[in-house]
Image (cartoon, rainbow, N blue to C red):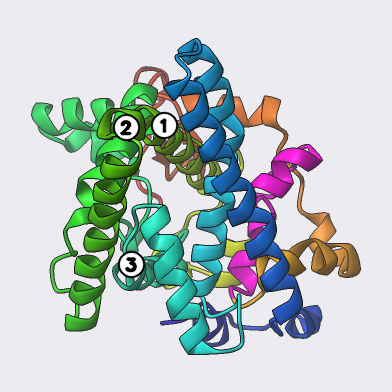
Amino acid sequence: MSGEATLARGHRSMPAWLAALSKYEKPDRRKAIRQILDTLIPYGLMGTLMVFTVRERMSYWITLAAALPAAGLLVRTFIIFHDCGHGSFFSSRRANAIFGTICGILTFTPYEDWRHEHAAHHASAGDLDRRGEGDIWTLTVEEYRAAPRLRKVAYRLYRNPLMLFVLGPLYLFLIGQRFPHPGASKRARTNVLLTNLGNAAIMIAAGFAIGLRTYLLVQVPVIALAAAAGTWLFYIQHQYEGVYWDRHQDWDPVAAAMDGSSYYRLPWPLQWFTGNIGLHHIHHLRPRIANYNLQECYDAIPNLQAVKPLSIRWSLKSLGLKLWDETSRQLVGYSALKTRSSAPSRG
């Protein structure tokens, strides 16, 4: 189910101001092409610079320094990929599929398979009874208490920052996404194969042109940094103090967007690299608004500005939030297991 359909069917009384957002859903081809050019050309230039530093035997620290903006540009490439998946980047479905697949090859993410899973995320974000669809694994306090010891250990390992933001993303992008999800359509499976062949072709061509060692010394740190940054962004969009979750019978998709999706206010350079994705409450209200229209939409609609922004400093507190407490209706740390007695307040 699309984000728009979820809002239309799930909300009991749609706020009148929500209709004003539709003005910003129209794709702009000039903005889209400009974003492709100001993202992919600099990304290619940064890659060339990194190759030069390796081949000239400069300190690898110089190469890694260049990997930082290259990784930022790869995150921005993923945002283009992401918008194509929502059908918002171009007005043409074919153009979205073509550029989505190209950006998917560059970001090691199969376009069609990811698009299906991400649509499920939008249809279920903030719904306690529909967890596990393209989200961060989150248990309630009572679920954790009732879990077998092995499941508790697995959960703690999964929520460990080293696993969540370093090892896990590397595995996902380099290995996990080489295989389609169970039940994937023939179209999605074909796209996974196409993405894998594209990645292999790039690696083989680079091996002949610059050497496999040079390619790996350039590509691995870039994908590692971009994957870590992207995972952090995805995490902080729905895992923060004051976030909204509810059981399905009471779940409200507008509340899930406004109160369950963060407004992550970033300094301008970081907002540019991340394609305005910090305005995530707007994105969950209207997934068909392309990233290049999000800031304009935010500036024009006062109701969107009522959402309390999350700063980088305060977002770091979210690392200590591990479980959902249904009694207090908030994310809590493991210390809550000892200091409070929580029981599900709803069936």
Q: Nearer the viewer, mark 1 or mark 3?
A: 1
**Tag 1, which secondary structure?**
helix
Residue at (35%, 29%) from the top-left corner? 214
Task: Give the crowd class for mark 3: few <14, some 14-19, many >=20 residues within 10 Å.
Answer: some
Instruction: Inspect the image, locate mark 3, and give the three-letter code of the amino acid beneath it.
Output: Glu
Task: Give the crowd class for mark 2: few <14, some 14-19, many >=20 residues within 10 Å.
Answer: some
Q: Is residue 224 above or below residue 125?
A: above
Task: Tell me the distance, in whole angstroms, between the alpha carbons under discs 1 and 3.
Answer: 30 Å
Q: Quadrant of the N terminus?
A: bottom left
Q: Nearer the viewer, mark 3 or mark 2?
A: 2
The answer to whether marks 3 and 2 mark residues whose Cβ atoms lie closer than 8 Å is no
Given residues 64 and 97, the one toward you in this image is 64
Q: Which mark is residue 216?
A: 2
Image x and y of residue 207, in percent: 27, 41
Image x and y of residue 240, in percent: 56, 39
Instruction: Inspect the image, locate mark 1, and give the three-letter code of the amino acid beneath it.
Output: Val
Q: Residue 181: in sight, yes or no?
A: yes
Q: Is residue 134 above or below residue 89?
A: above
Q: What segment carries the magenta color?
A: 260-287
Residue 330, magenta (yes or no): no
Residue at (74%, 42%) from the top-left corner? 265
Q: Quadrant of residue 83?
A: bottom right
Q: State the residue position of label 1.
A: 218
Instruction: Inspect the image, locate mark 2, and give the three-letter code of the amino acid beneath it.
Output: Leu
Q: Quadrant of the C terminus?
A: bottom left
Q: State the residue position of label 3.
A: 117
Task: Give the crowd class for mark 1: few <14, some 14-19, many >=20 residues within 10 Å.
Answer: many
Q: Quadrant of residue 112?
A: bottom left
Left or right, 172 with reference to 20: left
Q: Which mark is residue 81?
A: none
Left or right, 234 with reference to 193: right
